[in-house]
Image (tube, helix red, strand yellow):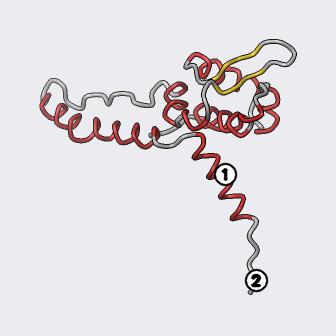
Amino acid sequence: MKISAKGRYGMAAMTYLARRYSAGAPITILSISKALGISKIYLEQVFSLLKRAQLVHSIKGSQGGYQLARPPREISAYDILSSIELTLMEKAAPASPEKAPELDHAMDAKVYDPLDKAIQASLSSVTLDDILMGIEAEKNTESLMYFI
């Protein structure tokens, strides 16, 4: 499985929104772009997909921007990536449909379908809250001083 730049940027932008969720104020794409070093135009495309998937709300006006549609603990990595990555769970093409269809059915049943389910389960088990806790753990690890 390969996650595109759009998917990685979507995860980063949603995490950025999650870090500021408790403030309750909408955040502009421009501020996200500056904070994360991601193209504003690229983020507009990403947020269009996130909005269509109802993961974010947009607020218009001078004080407008984007907010998470649900609390960070209710939004999984799978929710985000499946709204952005069109081929996240794309079916594998048959290897030999005319000569050996039973081979393709067996590979689907024993390899590809279980793999898709495992990926979905893994991504569904990680929420934005989990990522935020990981950020805090990294900060705490970096701030430790070791004396010899």
Report the side of 85 relative to 95 (left or right): right
Give the residue drawn at x 55%, y 26%. Answer: 84
Residue placed most toward the observer, 21 or 77: 21
Label 2, secondary structure: give it.
loop
Report the side of 69 relative to 111 (left or right): right
**Residue 28: image location, x then y, percent:** 79, 25
Report which residue position mark 1 lands on.
135
Report the side of 40 relative to 116 (left or right): right
- Disc ID at residue 147: 2
The image quadrant of residue 18 is top right
In the displayed structure, 107 sits above or below 45; it is below
**Disc 2 residue type (three-letter):** Phe
Q: Which of disc 2 and disc 1 is earlier in sequence?
A: 1
Give the residue drawn at x 72%, y 58%. Answer: 139
In the displayed structure, 2 sits above or below 49; it is below
Label 1, secondary structure: give it.
helix
**Disc 1 residue type (three-letter):** Ile
**Residue 97: image location, x then y, percent:** 19, 25
